[in-house]
Amino acid sequence: MSATPGPIALACRFDAQEWAEWRPALAAALPGDTLVRAGDPDHDPATVEIAIVANPPAGALQRYPRLRLVQSLWAGVDKLLADPTLPADLPIVRMVDPAMNAAMAETALWAVLMLHRGFHVYARQQREGVWQPQAQRRADAVQVGVLGQGQMGGEVSRRLRMLGYRVSGWRRGEPLGPVLASSEILVNLLPLTPHTRGLIDAAVLRQLPRGAALVNLARGAHVVDADLLAALDDGQLGHAVLDVFHQEPLPAGHRFWTHPAVTVLPHVAAQTDAHSAARIVAQNLAAWRRGEALVHQVDRRAGY
């Protein structure tokens, strides 16, 4: 590390509104640093040792020969790891923000409560002018499976248990069948890796109890869309709450928009808060500069 810190490159695929939010937040959290946008010709790329990124285009960091640390503003790093130009030994730190974990838990709780209490059914009945109370079950009679027990999945599981639900958490490497067989509601919070891409397919959906529900808050690529639609059409799956998709925004005309057993959210389950995340970035960079071990460094072999 140089005695005088060089500029920090911001390699972020932001629109104008996002830049207007993020750059001042990062500047306030890093008052002693100079922040430059990646590709800006007014700085020497050889002086950059740190890059702060948010889904940068592949190859965007190649111009920085002395890059020593990449700090992601997003929790998911699957797109970043797919960039073949990133050196294999370059440390990458993913965003772990308690505020984001809390937001994800709120969305998961809402989805589970909606499905458990049948509020999606009441919404349809309202549109049809139908007055028909549904059977009301206790939370401790409902089994919820949570795929992924990392920062977000662990927090979701904890909060669901606090509300009285019976929760089975699943980590990669453990038997999946028992969790699927008992889950009336399955919540996906897995990282996207080569091992989990396309995991939720016809074979997995067939193992759920008939009429079960899926809540996908992780990545669209975890799900085989055609298999999900087939399971919804034949009643194997009763409902799906989807926040993430293979293509975003979800294309006009996609069946998810109009399917009566699908609730669509526009990737809003847990949006990153710029001010909270900027403070975490500043803490991480300060620790790195002190020579301390990196927290939440990405394991390239695991994919997260």
Image: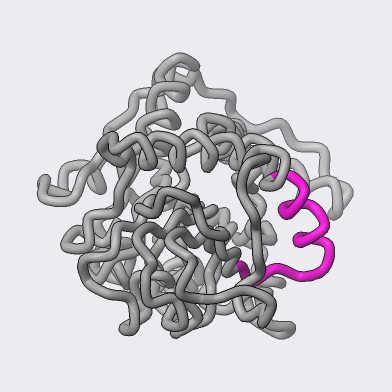
**Taking 281 as reference, is 263 above or below it?**
below
Q: Main secondary structure of the magenta part?
A: helix
Picture residue at 41% right of the left edge, 70% below the top: 80
| Residue 19 covered by magenta stretch | yes
Picture residue at 61% right of the left edge, 67% below the top: 12
**Taking 32 as reference, is 162 above or below it?**
above
Answer whether residue 158 is visible to the viewer in this image: yes
The colour scheme used here is: one colour
Answer whether residue 112 is visible to the viewer in this image: no
- Closer-to-camera residue (194/28): 28
- Closer-to-camera residue (128/304): 304
Residue 158 rendering spot, x and y as whole percentages = 40, 22
Residue that sits furthest to the front in the current view: 3
How many marks the image carries: the answer is 0
Q: Is residue 302 left or right of residue 35?
A: left
Q: Quadrant of residue 275?
A: top right
Q: Quadrant of residue 41?
A: bottom right
Residue 107 rendering spot, x and y as whole percentages = 60, 39
**Taking 293 as reference, is 161 above or below it?**
above
Residue 94 rendering spot, x and y as whole percentages = 41, 50
- Closer-to-camera residue (66/265): 66
Residue 213 rendering spot, x and y as whole percentages = 46, 50
Q: Is residue 148 left or right of residue 56?
A: left
Picture residue at 60% right of the left edge, 60% below the top: 261
| Residue 15 covered by magenta stretch | yes
Picture residue at 86% right of the left edge, 53% below the top: 127
Magenta residues?
12-25
Q: Which quarter of the image is occupied by the C terminus?
A: bottom left
